[in-house]
Amino acid sequence: MRIVYVDNNATTCVAPEVFEAMVPYLTREYFNPSSMYEPARRVAEAVRQARQQVARCFGNIRSSEIVFTSCATESNNTAIVGVAKANPQRRHIVTTAVEHPAVLEVCKEMQRGGYEVTFLPVDRHGNLNIKDFVRALRPDTLLVTIMHANNETGVIFPVAELARITKETDPNIVFHTDATQSVGKLRIDLAGEYRHVDLLSFSGHKLHAPKGVGVLFIRKGTPIRPFMVGGHQESGRRAGTENVPYIIGLAKAMELAYQNLDEENRRLARMRDRLERELRNRIPYLEINGEGAPRLSNTLNLSCHFIEGEAMLFELFEHGICASSGSACTSGSLEPSHVLTAMKVPFTAIHGSIRFSLSRYNTEEDIDRIIEVFPEVVERLRRASPYWDAKRNAPREEAYHLLQEAVAVH
Ligand code: PLP
């Protein structure tokens, strides 16, 4: 069976060029970059070049501002906990209700430790309200941590503007963004438009590098203490022997992603828009989550009223299609997605959500296959749904009223 992999916001395959670049460092160039002999210095030089390569993708920043970590979760933990350790006087954090658990749970942990956290709401499209944001900033605000693009819906927050507003309000508030879903998909000039961002996190495996490597950008002068302590690696900002092959892979993946970014984004948007249009034409009672908001061009999150996302996933995989319901981390739980809950997706639709996320390895044939299979899957599941009248091929009267009420309430 041909696999159609459309779950690239969960993880991506390693690009062949990335694998090739890594191989020497998994085999003959195995030396510890901290060692003093010549072969080890060669490895240290390769890490130095990888750091420069990553820095170049963010505009004209210093390569010393790039710190390699094991993943975005580690980068986010370092950012939030590290900033709190550096400035214990300030005890208030601003974030959003729709962050990935790698930020949300850290903020809740901070709350348990006595910090006050403001979780900003979003509207029906997934957008933040800038006035709410401005009102949330206080004299004791330590940190703002707001994601760049949402992993479930692809909705993009105006991070450059939010960072600017933060610094205009109080230059001592540290601004962090979890850019795990946007790095490699959007241009982020940390020396230009994004110059007010102090800290930025991401993981390699969302952009065709392997799992197990990430980055925390730390702007020079940002008050932050290390999270991982031990050796002197990464200039004392992240202890632990460098994961050299993966760092080399990450740098190569960044180079590839930014080589053709605009053209690739146009291609992805064309495929995603066609999928959205065709599914909308074929499936009644469908919601596009994040419609009307700026969105990543690779992401389509939709909800089918009156059916279960898990059942759709199972049936799709019977046809070789790998997608996801909610975020990868929350699928498998019976709780509806916290992102769609925050967006007030009607309760008749919230359990029937599914996310298709594309990458440069997806083709028009993949889209054709989903268009061929998915509407049939929805129709079959609806026929088995207690809310659906199979004879009329429409929701039962009472389900229809539920839907009307749910939409009216929101
Ligand atoms: N932040 C966002 C927005 C994500 O999408 C993810 C992964 O899905 C993470 C953080 C965590 O990444 P990792 O599991 O690589 O640490």
Image: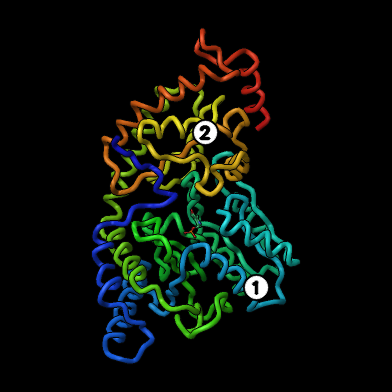
Locate residue 338 relative to residue 293 in the image: left or right: right
- Residues 136 and 220: in front is 220
User: Which residue is outermost to the bottom?
Assistant: 36
Label 2: which secondary element = helix
Could you tell me residue 242's position as x and y percent? Answer: 41, 76
Residue for point 46% across, 47% down: 154
Label 2 beta carbon less than 8 Å to ligand 1: no
153 to the left or right of 37: right
3 is higher (above) or lower (below) than 84: above
Identify which residue, 101 or 270, lies in the foreground.
Answer: 101
Give the quadrant of residue 168. bottom right
Q: Is residue 9 left or right of residue 258?
A: right
Q: Is residue 49 above or below residue 111?
A: below
Q: Picture coordinates of residue 288 (x, y %)? A: 48, 34
Which residue appears at 39% of the width and 73% of the height?
Answer: 243
In 3D space, how far apart are the residues under numbered discs 2 and 1 (Cα atoms)? 39 Å
Q: Locate the N terminus and report the quarter of the image it occupies.
A: top left
Q: Is mark 1 within 8 Å of ligand 1?
A: no
Asked whether residue 123 appears in the rendered view, the answer is no
The residue at which mark 1 appears reads as 84
Say which amino acid is labelled 2.
Gly
Count neighbours of disc 1 (C-alpha within 10 A) and say few if under 14, some if 14 to 19, many if 20 or more: many
Q: Residue at x 41, y 80 (%)?
A: 64
Q: Which residue is mark 2?
A: 309
Image coords of residue 18 (percent x, y): 28, 62
Which residue ends up furthest to the top in the rendered image?
Answer: 391
Amino acid bearing label 1: Ala
User: Which of the two labelled residues, at mark 2 and mark 1, occupies the earlier sequence position?
Assistant: 1
